[in-house]
Image (cartoon, rainbow, N blue to C red):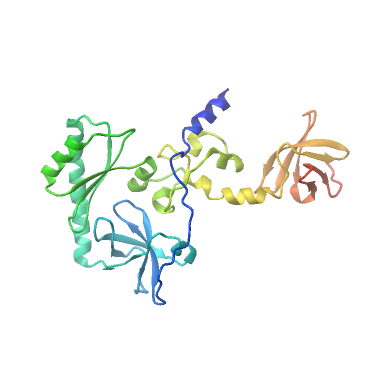
Amino acid sequence: MDIENNLKELELLEDKDIEIKVKVKKDHKIDPNDCFYRIKLTYNNYSKVCKTKHKTIKKGFYVIVPTIYGPEIGIVQGRADDMDDILSQDEILEVIRIATKNDREKFKINQQKGIEAYDITLKKIKEHNLDMKLINVHYFLEDSKILFNFTADGRIDFRELVKDLAAIFKTRIELRQIGVRDECRIMHGFGHCGKHYCCSDVCNELKPITIKMAKEQNITLNSLKISGACGRLLCCLAYEYDTYLDEKKNYPEVGSRIKLNNKWFIVTEINIQSKIIKINSEDNESYHYIPIDIIHFDKNKQIGILKKKMDL
């Protein structure tokens, strides 16, 4: 019963609202002198492949890139060399320029203004008794707009809040509702592994994570161990999933029968990393661990025999 309850709990952590975008190569015009870099956008921590003629931009450099809100600071994460990845991006942005000293100073000032605006906005949210969680406040480089990212369980009527904020900050206001994974992406932090959250440091595009991914990798189905700070299943469950699926094609399925010393056994466990399978006798009174490379297995019949005699 505990296992059933745990599975139901884990099902609630699955991503059911994330669509997988099929990557299709676009006919982008590429100049032979173009260099490509992956650049993190500072207002939402998403990264984009951008092109430029500069060949010596180092990781960590600040550059100015175009966004839907106007020119904004971006942080270089490194060179992008995978042409399939580059060509499948909907749009390849072009770096406007390398950030100047004034750009960097303005960015730091805006960060401080965002912190101050955050405290003011929290008070206003409480005054209007809105059930929403403010994540961050971002001022853009050219003072074109202030962006307020927040999370909420449902739709929020924040029209009166927008009026108050516009009157206080005297500029264009945008409140944007984001998901819990995007919240972690923006907030940063450290996961169970001791490293930065994958969503803010490794992943760019969010993909649906399912319990099946954990099952295929024989990971313990414990919600405390396989869920992240966002309350969803860990992003890293997807990293080796396809590899496990491909590798398992070379293994008998759990429940298959193996003949050993003229006695039939049932496959009960597969360990891809150690290349060993566990087999239990049909009466469940004994079990053995067998290297996969000494088994001749017929996938169609789901029956296997040892290639050579083995002392047990």
Residue 291, x across and y down, in percent: 75, 47
Q: Quadrant of residue 61?
A: bottom left
Number of numbered markers: 0
Q: Is residue 110 left or right of residue 303?
A: left
Q: Residue at left 50%, top 39%? A: 226
Residue located farthest toward the bottom when viewing the structure as drawn? 33
Residue located farthest toward the front when viewing the structure as drawn? 27
Please determine whether, in this image, residue 235 is positioned above or below residue 142: above
Kindly tell me whether residue 196 is visible in this rendering: no
Q: Is residue 24 left or right of residue 109?
A: right
Point out the image quarter for the C terminus. top right
Residue 187, x across and y down, in percent: 33, 46
Q: Residue at left 28%, top 58%? A: 67
Please determine whether, in this image, residue 94 is positioned above or below residue 288: below
Please determine whether, in this image, residue 66 is positioned above or below residue 55: above
Q: Residue at left 30%, top 55%? A: 42
Residue 77, x across and y down, in percent: 38, 61
Q: Quadrant of residue 221?
A: top right
Q: Residue at left 46%, top 67%? A: 81
Q: Is residue 284 left or right of residue 191?
A: right
Q: Is residue 211 left or right of residue 174?
A: right
Kindly tell me whether residue 214 is visible in this rendering: yes
Please determine whether, in this image, residue 122 is positioned above or below residue 97: above
**Which is more toward the observer, 10 or 51?**
51
Point out the image quarter for the N terminus. top right
Q: Quadrant of residue 175?
A: top left
Residue located farthest toward the right when viewing the structure as drawn? 262
